[in-house]
Amino acid sequence: MKKSQLLRLGRKYGTPLFIIDHKVLRETYLQFKKHLPRVQAYYAVKANPHPEIVKTLYKLGASFDVASMPEFEIVHDNIKRLSAKKRQEFIWDKIIYANPIKAIETLEELDQYKILLTFDNIEEVKKIKKHAPHSGLVLRLQVPNTGSVVELSSKFGCPPGEAVDLMLAASNAGLGVEGISFHVGSQCTNFENYVQALHLAAGIFNEANSRGLNLKLIDIGGGFPAPYDNQVKPFRELARKINSEIDRLFPKDIEILAEPGRFLCATCATLVAKVIGKADRNGKRLYYINDGIYHTYSGVLCDHIPYGVKAFKKGSTQISSVFGPTCDALDTISLSNELPDLNISDLVYTENIGAYTWASSTNFNGFPPSQVIHINK
Ligand SMILES: *Cc1c(COP(=O)(O)O)cnc(C)c1O
């Protein structure tokens, strides 16, 4: 997005303003499909659950990964509206419920939809058997998360040594076991994680099928890194690795799913905020802006992404601290942000702020989340 356009929108609509550019969203999705043509993308709704994002991706043919009933409803409602006729067929191939732990009430509701569910332990198998026996099961495998910005393997994933027995236990209980999934950790810039995970999954896939299961799918999860800086290697390099490993390790006729979240939605959004306070303290410039870590900059804390702010104004810069609007000192966006001399009411902006940001905004201290607008829809 051009700076002049951002500035104009910020002035027109007021700040903090979260601008979603659907052209960028479409281009990113098509880039994913182009480089991973065998892979069906199940957009991980948690990265940014805005219904308009779900709609745009659905129209391009995406499927969805949800992890709670409210996320399920966002997808279900929009799809119902967009495809009245296709109602019957969408659900199997359009939604995976990829939270390995599901409350009993959730399973009871999900059973009617007969969707794919992930699981990683025997207690979950018993729960599914009792409360959602019509689901298709996908084992979540524990894989190395080395070097990923957000580590996920400590919380979820069946240890490889137990995986086949667990799938057999589910199958013996009368449940349909469809395949294996993993997650290499979010913002995974260590592409070897995918290679190792695919190897692990292939070994288990083959062993499971030789012991009588009939697995049909591999779900390679999320983790695809957003290009926050030029340290992140191009997506096509990662895609090339994944494609050649899949072709080498798995039967030709299996289905390949992925659950990209961040990669699809990070780059489509820009935040415009406003300087509301300014001070010089201990030789350093401090700015206070009207959005912070309890709001759109939540990713600074929860997602470990060092978002900074940029100025529209030109001029020589100095290292400044940037704080959010709440009374909590934790509400610190950056302690080392190069900025020119700004005045109260000047606007600032942050690019590539679409993933794990607006999604985890709160109303803390009475400050509401940023207003959302859409362009190029
Ligand atoms: C969060 C999550 C994703 C999305 O991860 P990204 O790193 O944003 O691509 C995919 N699958 C599962 C199970 C998740 O928990």
Image (cartoon, rainbow, N blue to C red):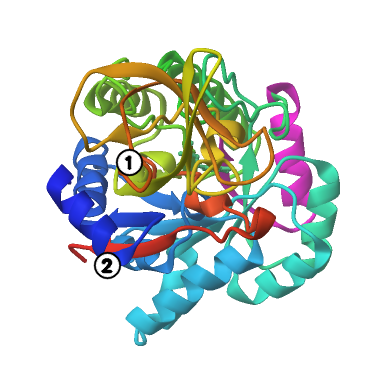
Indicate the position of residue 302 as horizontal and vertical percent values. Answer: 61, 36
Looking at the image, residue 285 lies above or below residue 182: above
Residue at position x 39%, y 42% in the image: 353
Alpha-carbon distance for marks 1 and 2?
33 Å
> Is residue 210 or residue 162 the one in the foreground?
162
Give the amino acid at mark 2. Answer: Lys
Indicate the position of residue 201 as horizontal and vertical percent values. Answer: 54, 27
> Is residue 242 or residue 44 the one in the foreground?
44
Q: Which residues are magenta?
A: 160-182
Tell me where residue 312 sits by quadrant: top left
Looking at the image, residue 324 lies above or below residue 22: above
- In the rendered image, which residue does mark 2 sit on? 59
* Labelled pair 1, 2 in contact (Cβ < 8 Å): no
Indicate the position of residue 148 as horizontal and vertical percent values. Answer: 52, 21
Residue at position x 71%, y 74% in the image: 109
Indicate the position of residue 285 as horizontal and vertical percent values. Answer: 45, 22
- In the rendered image, which residue does mark 1 sit on? 348
Q: Secondary structure at mark 2?
A: helix
Q: Is residue 2 visible?
A: no
Residue at position x 65%, y 60% in the image: 366
